Image (cartoon, helix red, strand yellow):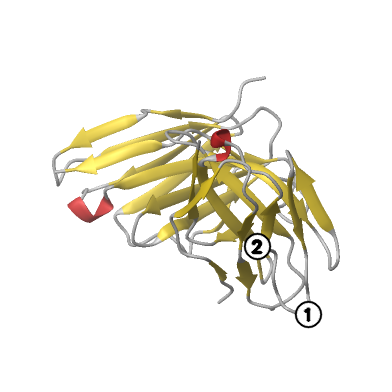
Amino acid sequence: GNSVTQMEGPVTLSEEAFLTINCTYTATGYPSLFWYVQYPGEGLQLLLKATKADDKGSNKGFEATYRKETTSFHLEKGSVQVSDSAVYFCARTSGGGADGLTFGKGTHLIIQP
Amino acid sequence: DAGVIQSPRHEVTEMGQEVTLRCKPISGHDYLFWYRQTMMRGLELLIYFNNNVPIDDSGMPEDRFSAKMPNASFSTLKIQPSEPRDSAVYFCASSLGDSFNQPQHFGDGTRLSIL
């Protein structure tokens, strides 16, 4: 079936560092791609999305570009803050006529002051 | 605006007991999803509904799990009988339209512990 693979965590960075969290997806069909963020004790919140190749999603300083040639959707931010500490999930639409999402296992990001 | 509301937030019960998790989606949303989150398996889609009708329940682990959506504003996920391996955080999410274009809005989850 379809799957999403993202880098293992935890990822620990200092404040103002550059962030990249890698995500790749299986190339079946023409999925939409998403990044969700989960803060402690809360549900997931949509961070950004892209619905077709070469689209760039952006929000709160985070960006990700839908790369069909490399089946990737890496999350980047130029200067992270302590408040960005959370778990980040990459996801794709499940495909095959299904309306759900297939999530990666999540990457725990820790930003130190 | 009220988001997706789940209850209870925490549930601790002994194995063999029936567990019922509840979800109120965002008003007007026509899709409702149930997910399970564990350290080992991550976030898994269990079942989803469109206009109160179950569309795909292939993620439901076994017959002990059942889900219903009697109306547009309420859904339940039931486990009977419960087992320790069912311990997880269960999330409900809703969306207006399918996942291709529309974001899913998640509740805060129910943390379930089966002793």
Quadrant location of the N terminus of chain B in the rendered image: top right
Tell which of B15 and A104 is nearer to you: A104
x and y percentages locating residue B50 in the rendered image? 64, 48
Which is more foreground, mark 1 or mark 2?
Answer: 1
Callout 2: chain: A
Image-based side of B66 in relation to B29, left or right = left
Q: Secondary structure under badge 1?
A: loop
| Residue type indicated by callout 1 | Glu
Give the x, y percent position of residue A89. 56, 54
Which residue is identified by label 1?
Answer: A69
Q: Nearer the viewer, residue A14 or B10?
A: A14
The picture places residue B49, in percent across and down from the top left corner, at 58, 48
Q: Which residue is mark 2?
A: A92
- Under mark 2, the amino acid is Arg
Task: Establish if A31 lies above or below A50.
Answer: below
Q: How many marks?
A: 2
Q: Which of B5 and A3 lies nearest the eye of the viewer?
A: A3
Q: Residue at x 26, y 48 (%)?
A: B87
Q: What is the distance, in whole Å, between disc 1 and disc 2 at their CAs?
A: 16 Å
Residue at 63 percent across and 72 percent down: it is A25
Q: Mark 2: few, some, or many residues within 10 Å (few <14, many ≥20)?
A: many
Q: Of callouts 1 and 2, which one flags the residue occurring earlier in the amino acid sequence?
A: 1
Subunit of mark 1? A
Q: In the displayed image of the protein, which residue is found farthest to the top?
A: B1
Q: Name the residue rendered at 57%, 41% in the picture.
A: A15
Nearer-the-camera pick, A80 or B57: A80
Element on which disc 2 rests = strand
Percent x, y of residue B65? 34, 52
Badge 1 local density, few (<14 within 10 Å), some, or many (20+)?
Answer: few
Residue B91 as seen in the image, left or right of residue A56: left
